[in-house]
């Protein structure tokens, strides 16, 4: 089992790093223009403006911290959990736009960038599936250093 | 599970601090009041200056009567024309094609921030909403 672990661990690390990088980039893009992100949130017609403003200020930083946590393997499982929740909420929220007659930009890669409904829904569902897979297969931190010395293993 | 919750809580708590800083000092922080108005609300207003933020070709094809064109492609050329029509008593309502377009918000923001105009709003639903109300088919 120990011999088979390294390539598997590497795959997990790569996937976690890719997801972390995506969160980091999308979070940074939103932080650059919180007013634009608030407008994107308002376009979903799910929340009052003030709630959208609060989310526009807060969510990008949660994404950035989650992304950094996944990338650098710190608070890894907590970051995965938040990432899964964010993605699930996002897939449901964006998925509901077309049935509600809305044709809006998702706001995921910065203000006003329209990627197309199915591209967003499928892309984020795949991302969510990857996060859930990571949560399932790994209940420990990935880094051998942390794995050996982390508080979870004591 | 306890560890997961602890880590997640830590991330969520730490994110509060930069969010607060963003809300207080970010140059592009959102306003706490929405700048959108519905067509029904706008119709009740007196002395409105409509600003069409769509591309020139769309404006030439059709626009709200009395509207002035101002899009980001020809901002410097078109802005003086808008200022000729504006006075301090007029409310400005910017519109673009539909609910999904963003340009009306961008133009409205530039009018507020770069030109320092007060009472700048965005028409919810844009030109599509206007057409639906005035030419229902």
Image: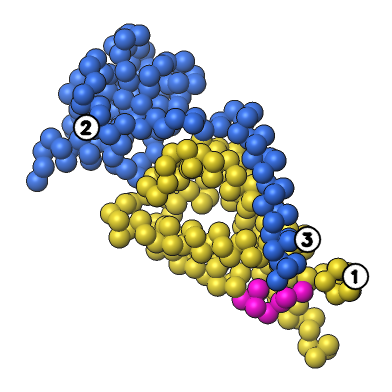
Chain colours: A yellow, B blue
Q: Which of pointers 1 and 3 lies earlier in the amino acid sequence?
A: 3
Q: Which residue is mark 3?
A: A74
- In the image, residue B123 sits, relative to residue A9, either above or below, namely above
Residue occupying the point 22% across, 32% down? B40
Q: Quadrant of residue B17?
A: top right
| SS under mark 1 | helix
Let me know if residue B63 appears in the view: yes
Q: Are marks 1 and 2 on the same chain?
A: no
Q: Residue furthest front?
A: B2
Secondary structure, mark 2, is helix
Magenta residues? A133-140
Q: Nearer the viewer, residue A111 or A84?
A: A84
Crowding at dot 2, Cα within 10 Å, few <14 / some 14-19 / many 20+, comes out as: few
Q: Is residue A78 left or right of residue B91?
A: right
Query: A47 left or right of A10?
Result: left
The answer to whether residue A137 is magenta is yes
Instruction: Give the crowd class for mark 1: few <14, some 14-19, many >=20 residues within 10 Å.
Output: few
Label 2 chain ID: B
Residue occupied by mark 1: A149
Q: Determine whether B102 is above or below A109 in the image.
A: above
Query: Which residue is under mark 2?
Result: B40
Image vertical order of residue A120 relative to residue B66, above or below: below
Q: Residue under mark 3: which chain is it in?
A: A
Residue found at x 16% / y 41%: B132
């Amino acid at each position: 089992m120990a011999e088979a672990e390294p390539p598997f661990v590497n795959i997990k690390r790569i996937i976690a790093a890719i997801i972390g990088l995506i969160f980091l980039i999308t979070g940074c893009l939103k932080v650059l223009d919180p007013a634009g992100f608030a407008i994107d949130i308002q376009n979903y017609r799910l929340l009052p403006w003030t709630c959208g403003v609060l989310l526009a200020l807060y969510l990008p930083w949660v994404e950035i911290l989650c992304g950094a946590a996944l990338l650098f393997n710190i608070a890894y499982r907590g970051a995965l959990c938040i990432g899964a929740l964010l993605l699930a909420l996002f897939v449901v929220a964006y998925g509901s736009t077309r049935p509600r007659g809305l044709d809006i930009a998702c706001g995921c890669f910065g203000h006003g960038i329209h990627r197309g409904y199915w591209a967003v829904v499928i892309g984020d569902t795949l991302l969510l599936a990857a996060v859930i897979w990571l949560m399932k297969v790994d209940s420990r931190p990935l880094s051998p250093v942390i794995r050996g010395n982390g508080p979870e293993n004591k | 599970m306890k560890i997961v919750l602890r880590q997640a809580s830590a991330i969520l708590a730490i994110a509060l601090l930069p969010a607060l800083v963003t809300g207080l000092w970010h140059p592009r922080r959102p306003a706490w009041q929405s700048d959108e108005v519905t067509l029904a609300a706008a119709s009740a207003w007196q002395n409105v200056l409509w600003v069409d933020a769509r591309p020139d070709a769309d404006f030439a094809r059709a626009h709200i009567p009395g509207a002035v064109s101002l899009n980001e492609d020809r901002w410097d050329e078109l802005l003086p024309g808008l200022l000729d029509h504006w006075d301090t008593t007029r409310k400005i309502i910017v519109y673009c094609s539909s609910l999904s377009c963003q340009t009306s918000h961008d133009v409205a923001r530039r009018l507020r921030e770069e030109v320092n105009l007060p009472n700048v709003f965005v028409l919810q639903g844009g030109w599509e909403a206007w057409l639906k109300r005035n030419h229902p088919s």
